[in-house]
Image: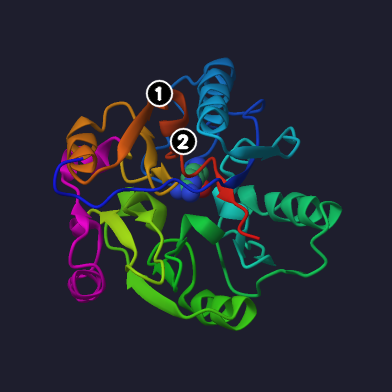
Amino acid sequence: MTGSPGRTATPRRYLMCEPRYFAVEYSINPWMNPDEPVSAELAVKEWTELADSFRRLGHRVETIRPVAGLPDMVFAANSGTVVHGRVLGARFRARQRTAEADHYRRWFLDHGYQDVVMPTAINEAEGDFAWTGEFLLAGTGFRTDPAAHGEAQEVLGVPVVSLQLMDPRYYHLDTALFVLQEASPTRPAHVAYYPEAFSPGSRRVLARLFPTAVIANEADAECLGLNGVSDGRNVVIPMEATHLAANLIAEGYEPTFVDIAELRKSGGGPKCCTLEIRD
Ligand code: ARG
């Protein structure tokens, strides 16, 4: 931890869905090739290891029951945005994923959340929304509709900053950016991102908002390294993201590596599997 501020972990609560019915039967992003074999068994193994990593780091993992015929339901992050105990659900762009939204809505209702709002605009939740502790970064370009950004601001009552995604491989904001440390009264949020995934204007916005961000390179992005989950100190990332990891260590973070080889065939990594419940 040379020359960088001390990093403090805060305990989190995550919602996850076992990939029991994992498959790549359709293609709705460039990572998905239905002709390439995938193994649900391997996906379950990777997912179990991810959940165990969170528990070892002291976090609470809640689970929702997987549903047969919904192979992408493992990507919990796409199904809800929870800030200050308010839940904004999802509305998927692809018809193959539409039904997932209601299963998650019911999970929240069954777990004491009275106030679950379902979006009217296409909204892939934490796939395209990242909470910085002060405001919500919101991606658009491939999945979430720009109208969903305004809706999120109204429903969640937090400021929203829109960002334009440009590269179809990085179709969700959470494949190109993640929050390393939320803002506190004494310091601004710290993020990592891959500038090339964003439009020139959005790159300028990011540079202005986060002058000390960890800047990722192509190798970091290509293994879905930006699909990380941080608790403010421990950062769970794909094991191939070694260049990113070195930069994180230099900034005082501690990487935890996970194998996501099977899940990545669907275009998802650690963050995609993890919906954060912020009460
Ligand atoms: N196959 C899924 C899809 O294309 C992957 C979603 C990954 N989730 C994420 N938060 N980026 O919708």
| Residue 111 sits above or below residue 139 on the image | above
* Residue 217 visible in image: yes
Q: Is disc 2's CB within 8 Å of ligand 1?
A: yes
Residue 62 picture location, percent across and down: 69, 39
- Residue, x 31% and y 53% (percent of image)? 176
* Residue 28 visible in image: no
Which quadrant does the N terminus fall into?
top left
Residues drawn in magenta: 195-223
Query: Which residue type does callout 1 highlight?
Result: Asp
Q: Which residue is mark 1?
A: 259
Which is nearer the eye, 157 or 1?
A: 1
Query: Which residue type does callout 2 highlight?
Result: Ser
- Residue, x 72% and y 51% (percent of image)? 104
Q: Magenta stretch containing residue 102, yes or no?
A: no
Residue 238 picture location, percent across and down: 35, 31
Label 2 residue SS: loop
